[in-house]
Amino acid sequence: MAIDRALAAQAYHLSKKGLKGKAIGETLKVTTAEANTLAGYRLTESERLGLRLLAEEHRWRLDRGDISSPKSHHISARARKGAGWFNAMASKRLFTRRWSDKEKRDLHGLGFVDLAGNGHVWLTAAGWAFVLATEVSP
């Protein structure tokens, strides 16, 4: 399915109002599976900000000759948020995979950010692709 940006935006806004796949599909006249896919494609402002700031931190470190990966609290500080902001935000959807104690299984996110248990974070290839694409066409 080719992603229609206008439909994706509408599906995202409907999902934020509390509608689920079937209701979104009926409203937009698409299947439930298509509605779920469309609703999941739009990143929030916080997610886009976090990805951009993580890329800036990576680049800043490389310019200084630093080879270590950034820590999540550095990204939070760049955003002028609390120390746990980036990790909490990225743990919702941007992560690659993580264990859920609540659900007792691995959860898979969008795959933009790898989050280590010790606070280190880095962009995946998909994360870099997203950042570079948004820099070219915001």
Image (cartoon, rainbow, N blue to C red):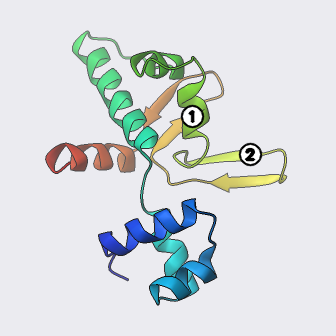
Of the residues under marks 2 and 1, which one precedes in the sequence?
A: 2
Residue that mark 1 sits on: 115
Q: SS at mark 2?
A: strand
Residue in the image at 52% along x and 68% along y = 14
Q: How many marks?
A: 2
Corner quadrant of residue 48: top left
Contact, CB < 8 Å: mark 2 with mark 1? no
Up/down of 65 relative to 90, above or below = above
Disc 1 residue type (three-letter): Leu
Up/down of 51 relative to 36, above or below = above
User: Which residue of the protein is positioned furthest toward the front in this rendering?
Assistant: 17
Q: Position of residue 3 (x, y in %)?
A: 34, 75
Left/right placement of residue 129 relative to residue 33 reads left
Disc 2 residue type (three-letter): Trp
User: Which residue of the protein is positioned furthest toward the left in this rendering?
Assistant: 136
Corner quadrant of residue 2: bottom left
Up/down of 49 relative to 41, above or below = above
Up/down of 72 relative to 114, above or below = above
Q: Position of residue 42 (x, y in %)?
A: 42, 58
Residue that mark 2 sits on: 99
Q: SS at mark 1?
A: strand
In this view, the residue in front, 2 or 128, is: 2
Q: Position of residue 65 (x, y in %)?
A: 27, 11
Residue in the image at 55% along x and 88% along y = 26
Left/right placement of residue 60 relative to residue 10 reads left
Left/right placement of residue 130 relative to residue 102 reads left
Q: Quadrant of the N terminus?
A: bottom left
Residue in the image at 57% along x and 17% along y = 83
- What separation in Å lies between label 2 and label 1 (alpha carbons)? 12 Å
Residue in the image at 44% along x and 17% along y = 80
